[in-house]
Amino acid sequence: KYDVMNDLMSAGLHRAWKEALVTIVNPPKGAHPFALLDVAGGTGDIAFRFLKRAPGAVATVLDMTEAMLAEGRNRAEAANLADRLDWVVGDAMALPEDLGQFDRVHAANLLCRLPQPERLLARLPALVKATAIVNGEIITQTDIEQRVALMAIANGGQIPADEIDRLRQQV
């Protein structure tokens, strides 16, 4: 049902967008170890595309909707990808501490939907080894500090550096 709704709302363009996104992520083509975290990953569409291009990769799909993850698990079994995928029920604004570290973190079209997007951005340095892709834009670790401050300003007020540190400890 979810994919049919996506097709109807985007006139099928979401499929091309997802392929373009995986090209941007540029997963390694060989058997090199590589880990992706897909935040708000739903049924795992992006993770599946990623894994098909990167034979040595693994992916973790995080979503707050158990039904979406259950559908994704079923699809992973059918596609023989289940052993390369982890499924985590979780909130993008309160990511679990034990997720680990990833080569890429992906969060498509998510920031505009979060009431406090800076909470996700504040958590990225602990999760990502080099870069994150948020709303299709590549963000390096050095950008994250500035993004947290900008998101905080956009949400009502400037946050001093010590407050950003405090915010990081809360998420």
Image (spheres, rainbow, N blue to C red):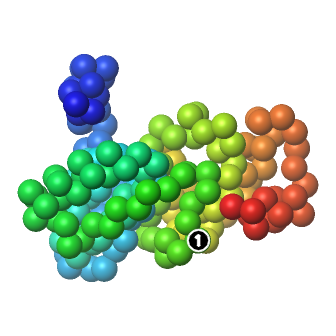
Query: Where does residue 43 sit, x and y in percent of width and height?
Result: 29, 47
* In the image: residue 126, left or right of residue 25: right
Residue depicted at 23% across the width and 48% down the height: 71
From what the image shows, is residue 26 above or below residue 83? above
Query: Where does residue 166 sit, x and y in percent of width and height?
Result: 83, 63
Residue depicted at 78% across the width and 59% down the height: 167
* In the image: residue 40, left or right of residue 32: right
Quadrant of the rendering where the N terminus is positioned: top left
Q: Can I make out residue 46 in this image?
A: no
Tag count in the figure? 1
Query: Where does residue 137 sit, x and y in percent of width and height?
Result: 50, 46
Quadrant of the rendering where the C terminus is positioned: bottom right
Residue depicted at 10% across the width and 58% down the height: 79
Secondary element under disc 1, as helix, strand or loop, is helix
* Camera-nearest residue between 67 and 63: 67
Residue type at mark 1? Glu
* In the image: residue 71, left or right of residue 101: left
Q: Which residue is mark 1?
A: 97
